[in-house]
Image (cartoon, rainbow, N blue to C red):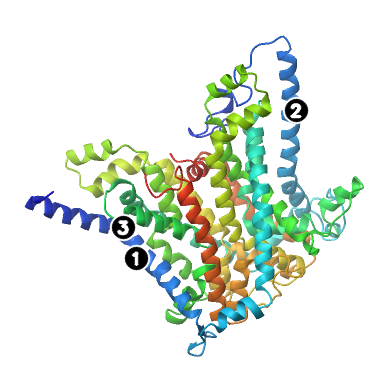
């Protein structure tokens, strides 16, 4: 348990390696040990209470997911029988696999396109000096803060009336090839921390700017690239509004996030099956998190702290 | 500055071309997916257009309809403001609290951090469905537990007075991102400042007030302003909560009464959908979209002006 989950990125070192605020430099007074024990108890009691708040919802969802149909209608908290077959029932629901495939297509292709097209833009905004750069950065931030609902009416008309692509996920995937503001912003923040000397050295060695970016800077930016790719993947995975607008008319184009809700509709009273479906939508995200925890947390700190 | 070396001029042109080439994907994206639709939204806000017949000039009729006659505008704006005030402040206070807690945990810190962080990752639709189940007044585990302790059992997502608190609870559950940001900020507070304060006889509260808070105030501002912007975009959770709690079957072309119960979960982004895609009143949908745009940009401007440390356009 302690190898991977205990690691944190360089921006936030292990609390144990650095004294936490408040306890810093406490003089070893005679009452010190007792006070420290009391503090330990208070802190950990609070932490356990908080952990219950964060973990119990998962626990209740899981327990309900394996209840029998009749028990799910009661107030019981603990399953009498463990109906693991509920997960199979959900998995074999018509459409569920299609939703999976569509979600993977949207999230996978969308992420590749968004990160690929955002790299040169972020690089130029971080490394080149040109007039209007600050203005352009402000435009990136403005676009990043813009709710998708603001421009949805003309965008929908554009994709459905002019290109006839409603009922598919392409109106969501194609725009990713033209730079994603959030990805551009995060990558630029990271690229600013890479000293100019590296690209200058590459240039002296006869590298063009593009080659300097690909050969010198990108390998150094691998952690940031992993972070933005993950963020983008989960943005697509979680997206509800996009599929609702463009894919709702065609169940063959639904994603997991969109289909999950209709699952509840079809199984009005079966909380057990609905919760099993919920678990199956949450699980991949949580599995990926355990494998890529470092990149994730790095990405979160990148959003709030300038590198 | 008076004469420019001929070679320099050519080099400048080359570097301008190179810059344009690097920026080209986004320049296209900005024009097609931001500038054009924004202008089109402005145009449609003065048009009568149902999406099928040709748009007709409508003057300010859409604007007056939205502000005066459309029944959902003011409830949605009130709900959004309620959420901005209550949800954002609770999220910041709770996020800071959990951040403080996690920097002090000595035993199994990694395990606690993981527990606190995980809910943030739950996909919004799944998390909302889970909470509608957990908080359902009939068989929900939350009320079952409250019953065990003899506490009152609210109707949560089925009660207009409790639906926004229930959404707030859901938002507090997913505090992981704020916790990490605050934790990083707290660990960056210089340690010698605490030592100096302690030598001056400052107790834990004085240390928090005079050392911790001033040091993390830029991050606090960041959390508040991004929280406000996120909350103004709050769409998926209230919509799904309303639909699932009301028992409306989701899916294609289904009409549903938004904001169940009693418009208490209706937010501003939801009425753009209601006007544009349920009532086919494109012009009025664009009016609301512009209101939403103005609100978000106002707060983004605050962030860019005040938050010079993290979200500034300069480097």
Relative to the observer, which residue lies in front, B207 or B127? B207
Chain letter for mark 3: B
The structure residue drawn at horizontal position 69% and vertical position 69%, both measured from the top left corner, is: B75
- Residue identifier under label 3: B23
Q: How far apart are marks 3 and 1 (CA)?
A: 9 Å
Could you say where residue A84 lies in the image, as x and y percent from the top left?
74, 53
Q: How many labels does the image show?
A: 3
Is residue B81 placed above or below B56 in the rendered structure?
Answer: above
Badge 3 and badge 1 both on one subunit: yes
Q: Quadrant of residue A281?
A: bottom right
Image side of residue B35 versus residue B231, left or right: left
- Residue identifier under label 1: B28
Which secondary structure lies at badge 2?
A: helix
Could you say where residue B262 lies in the image, as x and y percent from the top left?
76, 70
Relative to the observer, which residue lies in front, A255 or B44? B44
* Residue A92 shows in the view: no
Quadrant of image for the N terminus of chain A: top right
Could you say where residue B78 lies in the image, as x and y percent from the top left?
68, 65
Badge 2 and badge 3 both on one subunit: no
The structure residue drawn at horizontal position 58% and vertical position 19%, both measured from the top left corner, is: B195
Circle 1 packing at 10 Å, graded few (<14), some (14-19), many (20+), is some
Image side of residue A80 versus residue A7, left or right: right
Is residue A260 placed above or below B258 in the rendered structure?
Answer: above
Relative to the observer, which residue lies in front, A176 or A280? A176
Circle 2 packing at 10 Å, graded few (<14), some (14-19), many (20+), is few
- Residue identifier under label 2: A42
Circle 3 packing at 10 Å, graded few (<14), some (14-19), many (20+), is many
* Residue B285 shows in the view: yes
Quadrant of image for the C terminus of chain A: top left
N-term mark: 3 or 1: 3
């Amino acid at each position: 348990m302690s190898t991977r989950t205990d690691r944190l990125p360089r921006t936030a070192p292990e609390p144990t390696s650095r004294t936490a605020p408040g306890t810093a430099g406490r003089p070893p007074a005679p009452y010190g040990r007792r006070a420290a024990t009391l503090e330990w108890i208070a802190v950990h009691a609070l932490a356990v209470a908080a952990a219950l708040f964060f973990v119990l919802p998962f626990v209740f969802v899981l327990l309900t997911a394996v209840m029998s149909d009749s028990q799910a209608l009661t107030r019981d908290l603990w399953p009498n029988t463990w109906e693991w077959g509920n997960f199979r029932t959900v998995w074999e629901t018509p459409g569920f696999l299609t939703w999976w495939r569509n979600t993977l297509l949207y999230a996978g292709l969308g992420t590749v396109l968004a990160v690929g097209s955002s790299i040169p833009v972020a690089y130029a905004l971080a490394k080149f000096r040109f007039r209007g750069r600050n203005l352009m950065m402000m435009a990136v931030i403005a676009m990043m803060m813009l709710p998708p609902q603001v421009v949805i009416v003309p965008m929908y008309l554009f994709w459905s009336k002019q290109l006839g692509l409603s009922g598919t996920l392409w109106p969501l995937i194609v725009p990713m090839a033209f730079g994603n503001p959030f990805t551009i912003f995060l990558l630029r923040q990271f690229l600013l921390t890479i000293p100019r000397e590296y690209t200058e050295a590459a240039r002296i060695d006869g590298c063009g700017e593009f080659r300097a970016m690909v050969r010198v800077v990108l390998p150094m930016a691998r952690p940031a690239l992993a972070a933005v790719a993950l963020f983008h993947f989960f943005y697509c995975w979680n997206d509800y509004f996009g599929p609702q607008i463009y894919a709702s008319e065609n169940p063959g184009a639904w994603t997991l996030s969109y289909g999950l809700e209709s699952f509840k509709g079809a199984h009005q009273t079966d909380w057990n099956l609905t919760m099993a479906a919920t678990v199956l939508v949450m699980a991949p995200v949580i599995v990926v998190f355990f494998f890529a925890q470092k990149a994730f947390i790095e990405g979160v700190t990148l959003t709030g702290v300038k590198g | 500055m008076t004469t420019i070396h001929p070679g320099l001029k050519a080099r400048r042109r080359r570097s301008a071309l190179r810059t344009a080439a690097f920026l080209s994907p986004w320049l296209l994206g900005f024009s097609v997916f931001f500038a054009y639709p924004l202008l089109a939204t402005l145009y449609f806000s003065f048009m009568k257009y149902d999406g099928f017949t040709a748009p007709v000039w409508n003057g300010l009729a859409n604007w007056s309809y939205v502000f005066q006659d459309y029944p959902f505008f003011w409830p949605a704006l009130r709900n959004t403001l309620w959420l901005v005030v209550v949800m954002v402040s609770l999220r910041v206070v709770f996020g800071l609290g959990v951040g403080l807690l996690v920097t002090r945990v000595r035993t199994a810190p990694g395990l606690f951090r993981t527990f606190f962080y995980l809910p943030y990752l739950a996909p919004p639709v799944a998390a909302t469905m889970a909470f509608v189940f957990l908080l359902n007044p009939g068989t929900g585990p939350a009320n079952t537990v409250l019953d065990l302790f003899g506490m009152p059992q609210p109707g949560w997502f089925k009660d207009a007075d409790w639906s926004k608190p229930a959404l707030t609870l859901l938002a507090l559950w997913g505090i992981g991102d704020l916790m990490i940001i605050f934790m990083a900020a707290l660990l960056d507070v210089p340690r010698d400042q605490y030592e100096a304060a302690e030598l001056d006889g400052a107790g834990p509260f004085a240390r928090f007030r005079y050392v911790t808070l001033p040091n993390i105030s830029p991050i606090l501002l960041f959390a508040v302003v991004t929280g406000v912007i996120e909350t103004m975009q709050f769409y998926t959770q209230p919509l799904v909560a309303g639909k699932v709690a009301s028992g409306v079957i989701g899916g294609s072309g289904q009409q549903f009464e938004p904001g169940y119960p009693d418009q208490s979960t209706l937010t501003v982004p939801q009425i753009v959908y209601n006007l544009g895609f349920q009532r086919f009143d494109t012009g009025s949908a664009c009016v609301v979209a512009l209101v939403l745009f103005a609100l978000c940009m106002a707060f983004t401007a605050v962030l860019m002006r005040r938050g010079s440390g993290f979200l500034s356009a300069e480097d």
